[in-house]
Every structure is written in C-alpha cells, then in structure tokens.
Amino acid sequence: MSSVFRLVRDEGGAAPVVLFEDSTTPGFVPLWEEVGVYDALYNSDGRHGRDVSRALAYGLDRVSSEPGLNRLVPSSALMAEAIRFLENVNRGCVIHGSAEIQTR
C-alpha cells in the first residue's frame, strides 16, 4: 500500500479536479517524523498547498543534507525516492498554493 498526496480544486463538478498527485511507500514515516514533514504529508486534509510548503522545503533540505538520516529509510527503499517524493510534493504545493490537500 502507498501513501498518496493530492492537490485538488473544486470546479463545481461531481468531483474535484486533481491538479497534482504523487505517492510513495508508507515505510518513510519514521523519516518524515524526524524531519518534521509528517503532519504536512498525512494530517493536512483540507489545508492549502501554501500552508505546508515551508515545512516541506525545510524537511527536504534536511533529507538532502543530513547523511545520518539514511538509518531511517527502510531497507526496501532508497533515500533518492524520499527526496524525489518531497521535491515533487513541495513543487506541487508551491505551484498550486491555493489548491486543497487530500491525503490517503
């Protein structure tokens, strides 16, 4: 099972329009908690992208620059995947700052 992060906009249709979506393994949870992005990734439903982009950028900086965090990456995953996911989610939140977040 994977963790999904979406940015959506309600345009009055039956379902909101998905502006951005990415997913990753839930095995990164200990890493997300350590770098301070867990709430932004899992507890931000209904908030806007701009509300979490600063926390995501900070966490991305830490993941990219602190080699000791590798110990929190599950053996079945790579730090490169964690970095890729955070980069994409952060970029999505900056580009679509007024979009609403959905997580699952």
Image (tube, grey):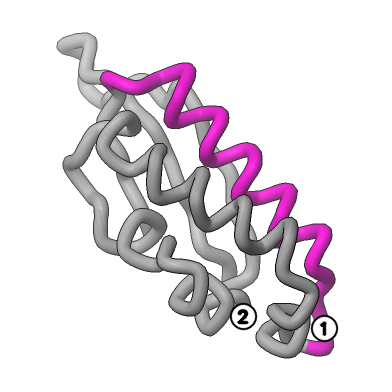
Q: Is residue 15 left or right of residue 80?
A: left
Q: Which residue is mark 2?
A: 27
What is the number of the mark on residue 63? none
Q: Is residue 71 above or below residue 80?
A: below
User: Where is 52 relative to 8, above or below?
Assistant: below
Under mark 1, the amino acid is Ser
Furthest-top residue in this view? 11
Q: Nearer the viewer, residue 36 or 5?
A: 36
Q: Amino acid at mark 2?
A: Gly
Q: Residue at x 49, y 78 (%)?
A: 34
Judge whether residue 97 is colored magenta.
Answer: yes
Question: What is the x, y in percent for residue 72?
Answer: 67, 86
Q: Which quadrant would the C terminus be assigned to in this image?
A: bottom left
Q: Is residue 76 left or right of residue 66?
A: right
Q: Residue furthest front?
A: 65
Span shown in magenta: 75-98
The CA span between labels 1 and 2 is 9 Å
Residue located 35% across and 55% down the image: 40
* Residue 62 x, y percent position in the rendering: 61, 61
Mark 2: few/some/many CA within 10 Å (<14, 14-19, 20+) = some
Specify whether 76 is left or right of 96.
right
For residue 11, what is the image quadrant?
top left
Quadrant of res 27: bottom right
Specify the principal SS of the magenta part.
helix
Label 1 with label 2: CB-CB less than 8 Å? yes
Vertical comparison of 103 with 54: above or below: below
Residue 36, position as x, y percentages in the image: 42, 67
Give me the residue at 52% from left, 57% from top.
59
Please state which of residues 46 and 83 is positioned toward the viewer in this rendering: 83
Find residue 21 and report its horizontal and vertical position in percent: 53, 37
Q: Which residue position holds label 1?
A: 76
Check disc 1 and report its element: helix, strand or loop. loop
